Amino acid sequence: MKLHRLELEGFGPFRERQIVDFDAFDRDGIFLISGRTGAGKSSILDGVCFGLYGSVPRYDTGEKRLRSDHCAPEDPTEVVVEFTVDDRRLRVTRSPDYERPKARGEGTTPVKHAAQLDELVDGEWIGRAPGPRVVGEELGQILGLTRDQFLQVILLAQNRFAQFLLARNDERQALLRTLFGTRVYEQYQAELDRRRKASEQTLGRASEQVELMLTEAHEVVRSHGFGAQGDDAVGTAARIAQLGHAVDRAAYQADTLGRERESAAEAHTTAHATHAALVALRGRQLERAALRASADALEAAEAGMAADRERLSRATRAESLRAPIEAAARAEAERSRAAELDEAATGSWRDADGSDLDVVALRALVDELTGDLSRWAEVARLESELQGRTASLTALREAVAGSEQSLAELDARRAAVPPALEALDVQLAALAEAPVVAESARAAHAAAEAQLAAAREAEALLAERRTADEAQLAASDAATRASATVTALLRRRLAGYAGELAAGLVTGEPCAVCGSLEHPAPAPHADDPVDDAQFEAAERARDAAAEVERAAAAAASAARAAHAAALARAQGLPVAELEEAVTGTATARALAVADLDRRTALQAQREELARLDLETAAERERLVAVLVPRREELAVGEDRVAATAAIVEAARGEAATVAARISAVTVRRDLARGLVASREALDARTAIRDATAVELDARVAASDFADAAAVGAALLSETERSLLEEALIAHEADLRAVRSRLSTLELELAGEPEQPVDLTASQEAVRAAAAAVQVATTAAERVAQAAQRLRALAERIDAAHASIAERSREHDVLAGLADAIAGRTSSRMDLETFVLAAELEEIVVAANLRLSDMSSGRYRLRHSDAVAARNAASGLGIEIVDSYTGRARPAQSLSGGETFLASLALALGLAEVVTARAGGLRLDTLFIDEGFGSLDGETLELAMATLDELRQGGRTVGVISHVEAMKEQLPAQVTVIAAPHGPSTIGQNADARAAV
């Protein structure tokens, strides 16, 4: 992955858009990001992290201050990062959540987190993903690194890599787990522990189940008397053996009671068969008596059936004459109805017409009237359309008149346009210079206001300057006094050194200064000696006073510079004079703006007038184009309406309308047509009546009936004939059935008594046998159910007891595996730690390749899997092996500079291993944030040499530091400059080494 470009606007300390061109450092390979503390050096890395991942680590748990505090409410906040991954040039644009002013009303409205991912294809940026969620998913697949992995291998943030070196085992495990994604092993451990606990619970429940079933089985044995009760004091196996004997005794009792139940059932069957035979005999006896009575009743009714048979026979013979009689009756009724209709039609015709015509004349009249109606129907249609055509013609006349009036009005309006345009041109010519005058007036007013603001600022800064000068004088006096105190103490101490040396002289021993064994005149001891503590305290006070003096001098210099700058911007003019100037320029600006507004209004008025003139001309052309065809249409319409009115008048005759004439003639024709039809129907019905009467007389004469009246009297309806036939058939069938069944019963009951037999004794015997079966069945079923239940319990107990041993062996294997995976062994190393330890070994090997060079071969990292004290996590320890002593020691014992070198080497090794695990992603850009200030000159050279090696293969390395020595060694720089009271800016100096 290679970064190309970073743009920051309204982000962190940067308000205006700032651009960092990383490609400009390709030839140097390494560049410095410098600036004073708090200027915003680390904010450059924050921008890269936010652009790629939408978050910044140092704001994860606190207030999200991504938006610049220098932004005005309407200013945007945006981060743009351009980078390349696998030959794909990509650009991600993000803006965080922030507040902006509402478009209407007061207050603010939230702006949501936004993101856009684009790709450069054939020189053009093509959108690939919109929205934070989709962009995050797409970048996750492209980068192949999580945010924590990216920070560990590309953005080596301040103190982040030192934290990994000095971390405890559990802290290091948490970081490695995030980087290498080994949480799945923790899930394996949790799952195995869950299964171990579940296995323990299963074994416990199985044992409890066996005990419960044994208790239940022995309760069955006790309640049914299957043997002696089991002893709870003996073991489970003995109780199971006792239960087996009880099962055998229960089976024997159930078999015995079953045989007793079968004997009772056989006795009940015999008694029931005997009772059933007696019941059947009694039933036949009662049936014979009933049949005898029924036969007597049917034979008595036989005499009345003969009259019904004769009546049915006459009705059957008369049925053949029913059709001629009904046909004659229908013909007479239809002839009567036809006569009535003919009489009514004749009366209606005479009332309407008065003439007495025969059928032939009436048919001729109908044909004549039908022809007239056919001709008048078309004229009636023209008559109905004539009114609409007349109305349309009237509307057309009005439209033509309106168009002619509109055309005249348009011509009148157009005539007034040229004079108005000429007047406006005269006014606009007088205001031609208004834009230049207004812009000049605005600039003069703005300059006057700026001078006034600078003059007021100079007045305010004058007091600050005086205060700063007084503070500088006071600090200078204090520094002078503190320096004099140190000088005085130094003189006193030098003067007292001789007395201190003399006090230490011993006779016969050499002097520490001259080596003489004789000490003829030792110096006296000072009365007020100066010790080291006093002198060091005075030096610290002197240095502090000097630092205060330098700070006061810098503040005074800054105050003087600020005051001078304000005076220069005000051009030395007083506030009162500048206020008058501002008032004058404001008046001039108002007048110029008023002229400009009037000029703008006149221009708009002229443009509107010209536009209306053009629209009027176009409207006149449109009216003329419409008016000509309307006039032609009006002339044609008037001719057509006149011709149609003449045709309608001829067809109307004396009627009010053609439709009224058609209606009257239609009524006359329909009356004539109805009279013809009624007379023809009367003649036809009369002929039919006469024919049916002749046929009926012939059929009656050929029958055995005297006349048609006798036939009518003999006829029966279908229902009456069916009921009569059914009654005769039913009587005959009943009589035959009763005689047949009675004959059979007489034969079967020959020799049997006439009175029905008594069933009392047999019924009592059946009840007694049933009661005995019930008692035997209840006893047998109770014992059989108990025996079956006892046998089932015994089988379940045997199976459960046999499975406990197998489950116990499986549990021992599962518990051992769970303890090993969880680290509950002597090594106290769980599976996840074991995997991470292997990764840590590779990291240490990669780190030692650089640490050996940076420490001149003195230090080497070593992975330790020693058991930690007090049950702490083990297996992820890191020790420092010192070749000077040959012994290992903890990383916390290193000095500040040594800690930085070891941490940097470890971070680079970790970056290499994490990158390899992420699919071998090539890292062409790397950042290191701070830490170089703790190195001495020689060590700094070694660290820089290591960083210089990282440039190999086209990699670009960015170093964030404020160390002056690094500024000299790294001419290619990005400088972050912080204004005294405003936002920071970014300056860039690239290819400096190539220029040299």
Image (cartoon, helix red, strand yellow):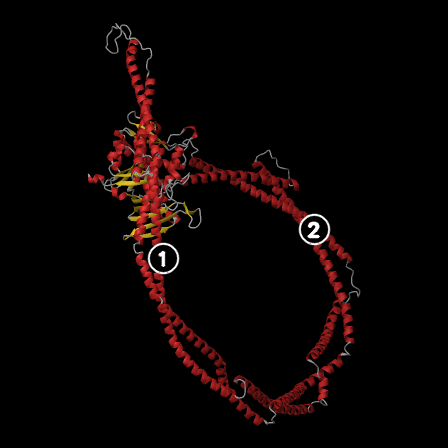
* Mark 1, secondary structure of its residue: helix
Badge 2 amino acid: Gln
Q: Which residue is mark 1?
A: 601
Q: Quadrant of the C terminus?
A: top left
Instruction: Using the image, determine if residue 578 lies above or below residue 599.
Output: above
Instruction: Using the image, determine if residue 812 lies above or below residue 539.
Output: below
Residue in the foreground of this view, choosing between 688 and 171:
171
Instruction: Using the image, determine if residue 731 lies above or below residue 460.
Output: below
Which residue, as the protein is rendered here, is positioned at the far left?
Answer: 996
User: Between marks 1 and 2, how big is the CA–CA gap?
Assistant: 121 Å
* Mark 2, secondary structure of its residue: helix
Q: Which residue is mark 2?
A: 774
Q: Earlier in the sequence, mark 1 or mark 2?
A: 1
User: Which quadrant of the view contains residue 852?
Assistant: top left
Crowd band around label 2 with a 10 angstrom C-alpha radius: few (<14), some (14–19), many (20+): some
- Horizontal and vertical percent position of residue 60: 40, 39
Q: Quadrant of the N terminus?
A: top left
Total numbered labels placed on residues in the image: 2
- Horizontal and vertical percent position of residue 685: 63, 90
Residue in the foreground of this view, choosing between 522 and 671:
522
User: Which quadrant of the view contains residue 345?
Assistant: bottom right
Give the number of the mark in front: 1 or 2.
1
- Horizontal and vertical percent position of residue 182: 39, 40
**Is residue 30 in sight in this rendering?**
yes
